[in-house]
Amino acid sequence: MDDEFDDARYEADEKHTWRLIATGLAGLFAISIIATTAVALYINTFNGSLSDTQGDWGTFGDYLGGILNPIVGLVTVYLVLINVIIQRKELRNSVREMRDSNDALRRQNDAIAEQSFQTTFFNWINSYNNIVSNTEWTGPGGGPPHRGHSALSNMLDNFNLVMANRLRVFMTGESFQAFMDNSIIEDEELAQIVENIILEIWLATKKRREDYFEGGFRSLVGVIFWVAEQPLKTVSGTKKFECLRIIESQTTNAEKTFLLYESWTIRDRNSSVFKDYRLLNRLGRSSDPYARFMLTRANHVS
């Protein structure tokens, strides 16, 4: 729409300029007619003879100049004004062309920046997936190691087993079973103890399996925050949402659970990213009682 408006205005300016030039030429033509008429009247009045007296020529010059000088002066001023108008239009056109060039350059830079963002994003995701595919887990009972997402799932199962053993120490069988069924603890003091135990075991798990958590998992957290913190002039909010939904769709419940526990560690860094982009909402339907319990206590992510 703007381009069509600019083209129409450009054509109107061109027509106006040519009208001004035509008017100026008409003025010059009128001067020549007036001059010819004045000479013809003078010749006709004074019998058309050429005088050999210098004073007569001076008188003729005064006569002709008295008629033409005011007209020539007005036409000259008009032509000067035409020149000024044309120069202003040329300057305006130059400014418009420069603006269009800058706009085109900006659009090109924006396209390059977006392409660079997408390339980095997908390379980062592929790098993380490669780390996951090479992650192994051998349970306490030995046997062949689990690899990839199966290893992460078994890692989480072991985490939950350790949790269950700890909770049975200070929870009755009835209260423990109620917790496992509905993930709710009515006693706030007991709920805070359970939360602290979960976070304690989480930190121990991270330390014990640094091969994944210091490499792959840190990379997963990094790409999430990298996308969310991109300036809007580089990456639109819609594009951010699309990228983070890709991450959400590709991560398993085990990875989401790890992100949930990690959110307590990175809470000061603006972990509302998890809430804003709904990265962990599906955990509410998980069969993992500890994840469901922590989700109810994680106002900063859910």
Image (cartoon, rainbow, N blue to C red):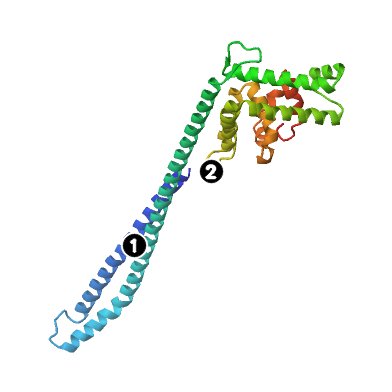
How many residues crowd around disc 2 within 10 Å: few (fewer than 14), some, or many (20 or more)?
few
Please report contact status of discs 1 and 2: CB closer than 8 Å, yes or no: no
Alpha-carbon span between mark 1 and mark 2: 50 Å
Foreground residue among 300 and 237? 300
Q: Residue 54 falls in which quadrant of the image?
A: bottom left
The residue at the point 19 percent across, 86 percent down is: 56
Q: Quadrant of residue 195?
A: top right
Residue drawn at 72 percent across, 24 percent down: 291
Query: What residue lies at 80% left-to-right and 22% top-to-bottom?
Result: 167
Going by the numbered disc 2, the residue's amino acid type is Lys
Question: Vertically, is 56 above or below 41?
Answer: below
Q: Residue 242, position in %: x, y? A: 57, 30
Query: Does residue 182 sit above or below 13 in this rendering?
Result: above
Report which residue position mark 1 lands on: 23
**Residue nearer the viewer, 290 or 25:** 290
**In which image quadrant can residue 60 be found?**
bottom left
Q: Which residue is mark 2?
A: 233
Rendered-image quadrant of the C terminus: top right
Q: Please identify the residue farthest to the left as the structure is shown.
A: 52
Residue at point 32%, 64% (across, down): 24
Q: Position of residue 277 (x, y in %)?
A: 64, 32
Q: Work out whether residue 246 can be spotted.
A: no
Q: Amino acid at mark 1?
A: Thr
Q: Residues within 10 Å of mark 1 (few under 14, many from 20)?
A: some
